[in-house]
Amino acid sequence: MKKFLKKFSFFLTIIVVGILALELFYRFIPNNYIEKNKQIRENYDSEVVFFGNSHTFYGMNPDFFSQKAYNLSNVSQTIQYDKLLFDKHFDSLKNLKCITINVEYSTLSQNDYMPELQWRKYFYESQMDLKTGMVSNFDIRKYVLCMAPRFKLTVSSIRECFNKGSLVECLPNGWAPKEGVNNQYNNPDTGKAIARKHEDGSVDFSKNSNRLQGIITKCKERGIKVVLVTMPVTSYYAENVNKEKLNLIFTEANKLAQNNYNAYYINLFNDDRFNNDDFYDSDHLNTIGAKRCSEIVNGFIESMP
C-alpha cells in the first residue's frame, strides 16, 4: 500500500507541476490579449480605432492612415467583444474621431456560444479585464487559465513560442502582418472549406445589429463617426458563400448607415481593386493587400462629410 501511495503521490506531483507550468505560461508569456490590453492604454490619444476580427487584425495597418490610429481587433473577435472593448475604453479615448467595425459574412449572425470560441472568453476576462457575463465564479477555468483551451491548442502555442520567442503577432500599432501568398491556403479548395466553416445557417442579425446600434448611438453623443466595413476576400472564398445571406448582410449594414447620420458603410467584399495575390490565404490580406485596404479605407474616412 505504501508503495502504491508513493507512486501515486509522485504521479500527482508531476500533474500538479505540469499544470502549474502551463498556467505560468499562459499568465506571463506575452500574447495578443496581454499586448493589446497594454497597447490600447498607450494609444489613448488615437483619433481612429479599428475593431473587428482577424480580417481587420491582418488587414488594417494604422501606418497608412492620415490620423493617428490603433488596431484593437483580434483573431476571432466577435461583435460581442468589440462592444465590450468599446464600452471599456471609450471614455479614455479623448481624441477619438472615428471607429471602424467589421460587418461581414462571419460576424452579423455569430452566436455568442459557438463551441470553438468558448475558450477565448476566459482570456478576455483575465487578460483584457472584461466582464463578459459568460464566466461563472464557480468555473475553475476562471482561475486556472490553462484549462480553457484544448490541449492541442496549448501544444501548438508552446511550439509557436519556442520557435518565435513570443505569442504576440501584433506590432505596437495593433496590426499583425502576413507576408506573401501561402498557396497551401490561398486556393479554391481552402476558399470553399473556410466559407463553409463560416456558414452558421442563420440570418438572425438582431443581437449583433443591436450591439452595433448601441456603439453608433454612444458615438453620436460625442460626434464620433462610425464606419462599418465589409472586408475584401479572395474569389475562392466569395464564390462559395450563400449569396442570399450575403445580400442580407449588405442590406443590414446599409440600413444602419442610412438610419444614423454619424454612420457610414464601405463594402470591399468583391472590390475589383483587389486580386487573389493580395491575400495570404483565402480570406486574410497579406502586407501588400493590407496597405491597399488601409489606403482605401483612409481615403473613405477622409472623404466623409
Image (cartoon, rainbow, N blue to C red):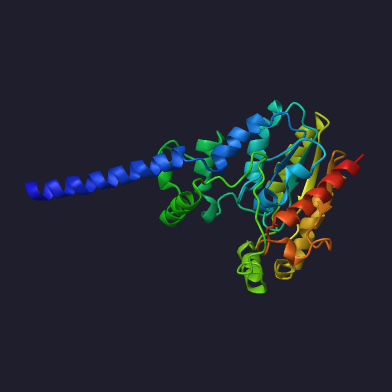
Q: Nearer the viewer, residue 169 or 246?
A: 169
x and y percent of residue 158 in the render? Answer: 44, 51
- Residue placed furthest toward the bottom: 189
Specify whether 36 is left or right of 11. right
Q: Nearer the viewer, residue 249 or 183?
A: 183
Asked if 182 appears above or below 209 in the picture, the reply is below
Q: Residue at x 11, y 50 (%)?
A: 4
x and y percent of residue 187 in the render? Answer: 66, 71
Q: Is residue 88 visible?
A: no
Residue 243 figure quarter: bottom right
x and y percent of residue 45 in the render? Answer: 73, 28
Specify whether 271 is left or right of 187. right
Residue 90 figure quarter: top right
Q: Residue at x 51, y 42 (%)?
A: 123
Specify whether 300 is left or right of 7. right
Q: Is residue 265 visible?
A: yes
x and y percent of residue 302 in the render? Answer: 88, 41
Quarter of the rendering occupied by the C terminus: top right
Q: Residue at x 59, y 33 (%)?
A: 38
Asked if 39 appears above or below 239 in the picture, the reply is above
Asked if 109 appears above or below 224 in the picture, the reply is below
- Numbered disc total: 0
Q: Residue at x 75, y 57 (%)?
A: 289
Q: Nearer the viewer, residue 27 or 230?
A: 27
